[in-house]
Every structure is written in C-alpha cells, then in structure tokens.
Image (cartoon, rainbow, N blue to C red):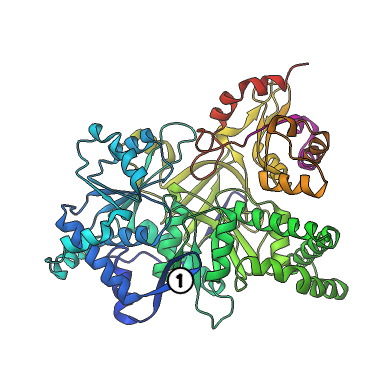
Amino acid sequence: MREFTVPPMATAPPVGGLADAVFEHAEKDPDRAALSRGADGRWEDVSAALFRDEVLALAKGLLAQGVRFGDRVALMSRTRYEWTLFDFALWSIGAQPVPLYPTASAEQVFWTLYDSGACACVVEHEDHAMTVGSVIDRLPRLARLWQLDAGALAELYAAGAHIEDEVVHRHRLALTPDSPATVIYTSGTTGRPKGCVITHANFMAETDNIVQRYESVFHSRPDDEASTLLFLPLAHVFGRMVQIAAVRGRVKLAHQPRLAAPVLLADLQSFRPTFVLAVPYIFEKVFAAARRAAEAEGKAGPFDKAVDVAVRYAEAVEAKAFGTGHGPSATLRMRHQFFDKVVYAKVREALGGRMRHAMSGGSAMERRLGLFFAGAGVTIFEGYGLTESTAAATANPPEQTRFGTVGRPVPGTTVHIADDGEVWLRGGQVFAGYLGDARATDAVLRDGWLATGDLGALDEDGYLTITGRKKEILVTSGGKSVSPVALEARVRAHPLVAQCIVVGDDRPYVAALITLDAEAVAHWLMMRGKPVPDAAALVRDPDLETEVRRAVVAANTLVSHAESIRTFRILAAPFSEEDGLLTPSLKLKRKAIESAYAAEVDALYRT
C-alpha cells in the first residue's frame, strides 16, 4: 500500500487560540482538579478556576513588563508546573513561547534567542541565568530575564495587578487559529537547529483528534478521573503536545522534572496516573528493574517464564483482533492468570497501579517489549511523528494494536510512501514552515505534503513501519545499503546495553560501538560475585563480552548476512549530551560520535 488516510474526528475552530480552553473550562466547571503540583510524592490539586486566575494574573504581569502581541519569549527550564502556566499566559496575550532545553549550551542558547528574536527569557535557576548572561551582549533584542527560583512569579503578579482583566481578553480574542503559537527548534542532528513555526491550529488539530480517538484509554476504568504525569521535556514537541492535550481534554496534569528512573518511578507510585506518554527508554528501565529484582530474589527463571507467557498471550490477543487467530488457549489463560498475581501485578504497581494504557514515541520500541507489557496488563500504543508534524502523525489504535509498527494515521492525517520509500504526511498538524528559512521550508513542504526524511512502509491495513532515515542509510564499500535503526534497537534490548551505534559507511562490512548500562552491569557483577573493576578492565571482561555478543547475534537474525554486524567494540563510557554526542531528546548524533570515536571505528576494520 502506498497511501492511507484516516478522516478527522475534530477540526480546528474558525476563531480563537489555545488559551481559550483554560477560560472556558473554568467557567463551566470551576472546581474540577485541572492540574496537580508538587514534589517528592506530595501533590496539591489546582482547580480549573485557580489555574485560570493564575494564568490571567501572569498574563497581566507580562503585559506590564513590556511583552506584546506577537512577541517571542524563551523558556529554559525542566518540566514543571510553572512552564505550563507561562505557556498559557503567553498564549493569552498572543505571544509565542520559544522552548530551550535546560541542558542547552551557551551557543545553543545564543542561536535560539538570536534566531527567534526573543524579547525576554524565563529561566529556572541561577545556572541558567548565567548561561544566558554569558551571551547577552550579542542579543540586543533581549530586554527581560526572569528567574523562577528567584521570585519571578510574585514579581510578575505584582507588576500586573493594576491592569484590568479585559486587556488580556482583548489580546486573547484577537488571536486566530493560524496565528503562530510557538517556535520549537529541531535537535540539530544534521546541522544548525531550525525553528519550526507551529500554529494554534496545528496544536488544535493534533491534540483534539488524539483526545477524541484515545479518550477511552486515558482512564484505568470508565468511571476513573483521567490523569497523567508529564515527565517528557517541555522543550520537546512531544511534551508540549501532552501538556496541551491534557488541558484541552480535561485530563488532570502533573509534572515531574527529573527523568532519572528511581525518582520517576517513585512519583509514578505516589501520583498514580491512569495514562502516560513516554519514550521507550522508560519502559525499558521498568522492565530491566523488574528482572533485576527477580534475579536478586533467585527468581530469574520464573520471571523469564512469565515474560514468555505474557508475550504469547499478547500475540494471541493480537491475532484475534486481526481475525487471524482464536485468542489465548485455555491453558495459556490459566498460566497467564497465575503469573498475573505473582509477576505482572508488580510491574503494574511499579507504574503506579492504576495505569492500563500508555503511548510511546520518540524512537522505536522493540516488538517483544511491547508484547510483554500488553500481556502484563499495560498496553503501549506506539506512535510516530516529528516536530514538523506537531508530534504524533500515526499511532496504534486501541482496538487493533499491531506491535512492532507505529500504527495507522491519527484522525485527519494521510500517510503516503514516495517512490524512494520516504514517508510523506498531510494533515492539519503539519507545521507552517521554518522561521526565516524559505529554502529549508520548500525542501520539506511540497504541495501540502511534509517530506519527513524517514523511510517506511505501509501494510495492507494502513499500519506504518519506520525502516530508517534517508540520511542515516549506510552503504558499504560493496554497495549494500543498510538501515541501522532495527539493528541498534535489537542490540539495545539486551539489559546490559545502554546504547548502540551501527557503522559501516564506505567500509567493507557493518560493525557497532556499544555502551553499557551502569546500573545493570553493577547488578550483573554482584549476582556473579565479581569484583567491580575499573571501566577499562570491565569492557575486556570475557563473560561480559559473551553477553553483549548474544545481543549482537539476536540483532543479526533480523537481516541478511551482508547487513549483519560482523564485529563490535564495547566502550568504557556512554554517549552523553554533555559531550555533544546526544541530542536533548537522547537521539544519537551519528557524525559527532563517529568523529569522537574515530580511532575505535578504525580499529574495527583492521585485519
């Protein structure tokens, strides 16, 4: 199949902007818990009326401090309640937030502020303020800097106290859906980041269709209050989409600023969301932690049996949904019921206990992992999208989830496969273009279609599988084209592996650089009674190398011999954002990695 369309369930309204929902919800249901704020397991509900009042007070303060309709204001912070507050306050006066990752370097901060023409910037703490301060002499348009942990909210509330509410409402009502809502900069994996102009209509088309299509799965039970814990970076389009969908869809929203697994899992258990949207990394960590706990208790064998039962159970349910099977057998159901009490319930409890569904995006999830979670009682709907498509363009439907694919087009979207295998998208969520870069815009927007740069295939039911990225295809010196994505994902599925990058462009064969998961390795050493060596000695441990080789062999079963990984090198340290080897959304910067590890790559090809 070359093209598949799903009709829209919702269309952007002819008037208004994103902030309207805050005021409409407060008018209709002022006492509803719209958000929760807190930290360290203590949560305080924020009513729809209180959120509206805080948005209004902040909007007045921004006006008093000189922010005007159409201005751009940068936000540099971790994921927290105040970011959502600033977003909706800025939208209330027709201004445009420009997100910055909290880990951004001084030069990244400079480029974003300079290119966007930001007139002001909100930072979280003094370190961020110093980063902005180090480049402020090159930013003549930047007139204001507010620091959240230095009383920015109180300062702005006080500044705007004399302004009438009606002034804000006049600004808000002047917005139209095609007005720019935000400028989100790409991760810059292949060059200088570009500013994606995303309109209010883009976000409305995206979030309203997702809310209507998936509203039933936001709840753990039909009568439960829907709630989600947002821990994705709000500087990333996926996090912003979740934020807006929650507010527009009346899903209680809480924020978690630290993506470290131990802290995140503790907050999942205290907040107990009914639904989350995450990246595969989170689910990989939950699974790995569950297996380590079982192994520490001497129950690795039963755990692995439980995994096998969950996978086979989910496969049988999947086959029945597509009319190719009869569902789980009586024997399989009995075994599943047994493991549900002793294994699967613990996995669900690690996610808070109430969650029965989740959505995953950002990178590929290994099919077996998705099947395991579904068999354990938490169905993960994998999806696909870009900053330029305002996040999700496809997602697996609840009634027919095809694991290992990124699903069908979300309502209102068409997916087309071009002659060269490139995925093209059309829909109301496709962005307006790159800020001030007509040439780059024309390169990706073609007669209403967004050329994604990703390669994929549609099956007979309209489910999309991403097979690689055009710019990342390796061509060996023998002329064999290799997509590294599936190989890397399968190697990374091994609990000891943190990251994998496949190399081989203009080389005689395919090879890989592999990094280790420190927590998993520490557990592996402890269970085998091995001392903890230094990093250099660890990567030469023959038993460890044997384990990693198993991951490589498993990955090679996916491809032909010519495409298989012939050799690999275990590295002593992981790739990090601080070293310039990962984007803030944890994607590999391939050219930077190959340059930084040029000696190690060359060693893979010495005979």
- Find residue 33 and report its image quarter: bottom left
Looking at the image, is 349 positioned above or below residue 459? below
Q: Which residues are magenta?
A: 551-573
In the rendered image, residue 480, in percent from the top left (x then y), is placed at 70, 27
Q: Is residue 321 visible?
A: no
**Residue 568 magenta-highlighted:** yes
Looking at the image, is 45 positioned above or below residue 174? below
- Find residue 467 and report its image quarter: top right
Q: What's the residue at 33%, 51% (across, down)?
A: 182
In the picture, the quarter occupied by the C terminus is top right
- The single residue placed furthest to the top in the displayed view is 607
* Amino acid bearing label 1: Trp
In the rendered image, residue 398, in percent from the top left (x then y), is placed at 61, 68
Q: What's the residue at 70%, 42% (across, down)?
A: 497
**Residue 303 magenta-highlighted:** no
- The single residue placed furthest to the front in the displayed view is 531
Tell me the SS state at disc 1.
strand
Q: Residues within 10 Å of mark 1 (few under 14, many from 20)?
A: some
Q: Is residue 107 visible?
A: yes
Q: Is residue 311 left or right of residue 577?
A: right
Q: Nearer the viewer, residue 314 or 5?
A: 314
Q: Nearer the viewer, residue 36 or 188?
A: 36
- The single residue placed furthest to the bottom in the displayed view is 223
Q: Which residue is mark 1?
A: 43
Looking at the image, is 333 positioned above or below residue 283? below
Q: Is residue 202 left or right of residue 487?
A: left
